[in-house]
Image (cartoon, rainbow, N blue to C red):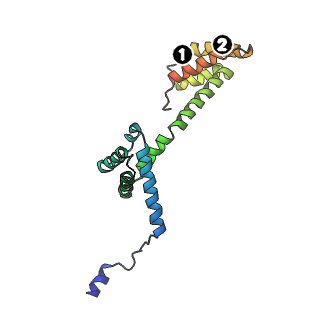
Amino acid sequence: MNDEWQNEVDPDEEIIYISKSELKRDAIMHHELGQKLVNLSPANLAKIPMDAQLHEAVHLAVKIRNKHGAFSRQLNYVGKLLRFRDLEPINIAIAKIENQHLIANQYFHNLERLRDDIIAKGDDAINQLLLDHPSMERSKLRQLARQAKKEAEQNKPPKSARQIFQYLKENIPAEE
């Protein structure tokens, strides 16, 4: 009997031991991820890739939020379910949701940079912009750029600069 058992175990196979501390860190990480899922709005929660069992558990946790004991038990259950899931797609989706405001800020900064280039460089910047976005009107951009320069020279409010920004915002999609 002993010989049979020894034949089944490969002596070259590496045994990986996981410390108790590492198991606790993993449990805390799964619990915190579950907490993030529960705290998402329904619209953002719909963007998270989850299977039916995890989806149901998270929605139940959202429903019983006011009952402290039941909520913490349900949150522990969500963390337990997360232990057996591939967390990468979930983490990527949460990161996208959390970084949406950063992406929006970057988009607006790019539009502001384009506007400033159009005002400062004139036709060169407009030609470069039209190569990337041929649907825009060259004459409108040139007219607004001339007006914006004139307003800046006369220390008037930057009405034309705002119009250039608005025109760019309407014609350049945020996905770029």
- Residues 17 and 9: in front is 17
Q: Residue at x 35, y 78 (%)?
A: 10
Local SS, label 2: helix
Q: What is the crowding at mark 2: few (fewer than 14 residues within 10 Å), some, or many (at least 20)? A: some
Residue at label 2? 147
- Residue 30 is situated, as x and y percent measured from the top left of the image, at 43, 56
Position of the N terminus, as image quadrant, is bottom left
Taking the view exactly as shown, the residue that stands out farthest to the bottom is 2
Vertically, is 115 above or below 23? above
Amino acid identity at mark 2: Gln
Vertically, is 104 above or below 142? below
Residue 88, which numbered label?
Answer: none
- Residues 147 and 132: in front is 147
Task: Say which label, 2 or 1, has the lower sequence index.
Answer: 1
- Residues 114 and 79: in front is 79
Mark nearest the camera among 2 and 1 is 2
Q: Residue at x 48, y 45 (%)?
A: 95
- Residue 12 is situated, as x and y percent measured from the top left of the image, at 40, 78
